[in-house]
Amino acid sequence: MTRTPLSISLRLCLLFAAIAAGVFGVVDAYLYRTLEVQMAQRDDADLLNKGVLVRQLLRTLPAGGRMPQEQLEAVLAPMIGQEGVMLHVSLPDGQVLASTVEDEMRLPAHAPVPLARAPALDDIVEVDGGPAPAHVLAMLADYGGRGARTQVRVLLLRARSDRLAILEHYRADLLATVGAGTLLAAVLGFWAVRSGMRPLRGMAAKANDIHTHHLATRLDPAAMPAELREMATAFNDMLDRLEEGVQRLSGFAADLAHDLRTPVNALMMQTQVALGQERTVEDYQLLLESNQEEYERLARMIENTLFLARAENAQLALAREHLDLGRELAQIGDYFELLAEDRGVQMTLGPMPEHPLFADPVLLRRAVNNLMSNAIRYTPPGGQVRLDARTEGPWITIAVANRGDGVPSFDLERVFDRYYQADPARASTSSVGLGLPIVRVIMHLHGGSAHAEVRPETGTVFSLRFPRHAGAA
């Protein structure tokens, strides 16, 4: 079962919630710990002050006799207050003089602060026991005036239960704050994401308006947020390429239909004329021979079209090998020599490079054959066609030059387009304008290029540039 991915809005919303929970949690933990430490420090300072006051008060009590426990506790009560502080005063032999401790069995036995030293914060220790830990200050004090002093042991205890209750309440408030803050951040984050993605929804709406009959729609990068301008530009570039491809495909289909219609119409017309009346066997043989030429032309068109379609869809696999270029071009020259003689054209072979050519031999011959066929066809009697090759840096260039009527300069870039005829008057029944496009596709398959130029000294020159090294393609 395929799991449906979460939407970007929901993902960002959950991410914002997680970030908010983390931030609120860290901040609240810091505030809680700070409050806890400050409250403990304040309690210890208050306990220390009470201890100092109790020690001073015991020293100023009248001499000459001990006060009853109830009376002494009443005297000391204002010193300790009612904030969870308990007092226990006893003689060295353990006799209790005053005590507000409910369970004296749980009193700690720490060494008291001697009389010669004033108590400090470091003398306060934390002890466990009871429902909560307590802070204890133990010290020795003089009890009674001069001449009748009695050394007593004073214990001051502060239970932390009241402070813990405050901290627990504060902790509950902090947890509630974390939950509320996280929920608020998630809601606001979701709203912000939805608002921020409005331009993307606009792009989606534009994309939905595009189809093969309506490719003129474009996005306005200037109206997009900075983060989406590059995407809008890339989107427009993609639409430009698609529009160009659709136009080329439409043009190709129209050209193909036009060129197929011509031989088909010729076949139909010849057949209708032949069937219009009774004819001799020789007439029917001539008709069939004429039809055979049209069939061959149709077969070439179909084969060339299929070749171009397979090449442009990367369905052709090259069978490259290292070729002796001089021998390959010499064989091609021999093949066209008779055709050139029939047309009264002189054909020459130029010098050849010693470096082998790494190419598919079948496709190489097809590309050069197309150039040679065109050159001989468009060279007037008495003209010259020259085939040569040379090394130019990382390239090996094969050139076919002829001194025909030449190709106008403004047509040089278009002669490699499908079904393009530089001179419509030249459009014979045997040429359909696919030879040079096939040459260009073959060169692209080899990682090279095909060019056409007109030179005053050599006439029209078609050049094929192959990579010299196998890894350069």
Image: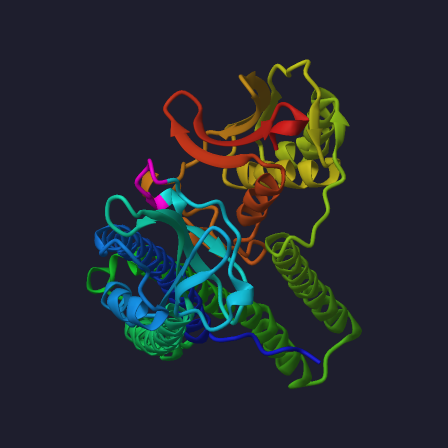
Residue 79 lies left or right of residue 450; in this view the side is left
What residue range appears in magenta? 115-121
Residue at the (57%, 69%) spot, across then down = 260
Residue at the (47%, 54%) spot, across then down = 126
Residue projecting furthest to the right? 281
Residue at the (46%, 71%) spot, across then down = 11
Q: What percent of the width, then of the height, locates residue 243?
A: 39, 65
Looking at the figure, which quarter contains the C terminus?
top right
Whether residue 411 can be seen here: no
Q: What percent of the width, then of the height, locates residue 144?
A: 28, 52
Residue at the (67%, 36%) spot, across then down = 364
Tally of numbered tags: 0
Looking at the figure, which quarter contains the N terminus?
bottom right
**SS assignment for the magenta stretch, majority:** loop
Q: Nearer the viewer, residue 80 or 99?
A: 99
Q: Is residue 186 magenta?
A: no
Q: Nearer the viewer, residue 404 or 133?
A: 133
Residue 341 lies left or right of residue 149; in this view the side is right
**Would you place residue 450 above or below residue 53 in this image?**
above
Q: Nearer the viewer, residue 1 or 357?
A: 1
Whether residue 468 can be seen here: yes
Q: What percent of the width, then of the height, locates residue 341?
A: 64, 31
Residue 293 lies left or right of residue 400; in this view the side is right
Q: What percent of the width, then of the height, locates residue 297?
A: 65, 60
Q: Quadrant of residue 327?
A: top right
Residue projecting furthest to the front? 64
Residue 448 lies left or right of residue 38; in this view the side is right
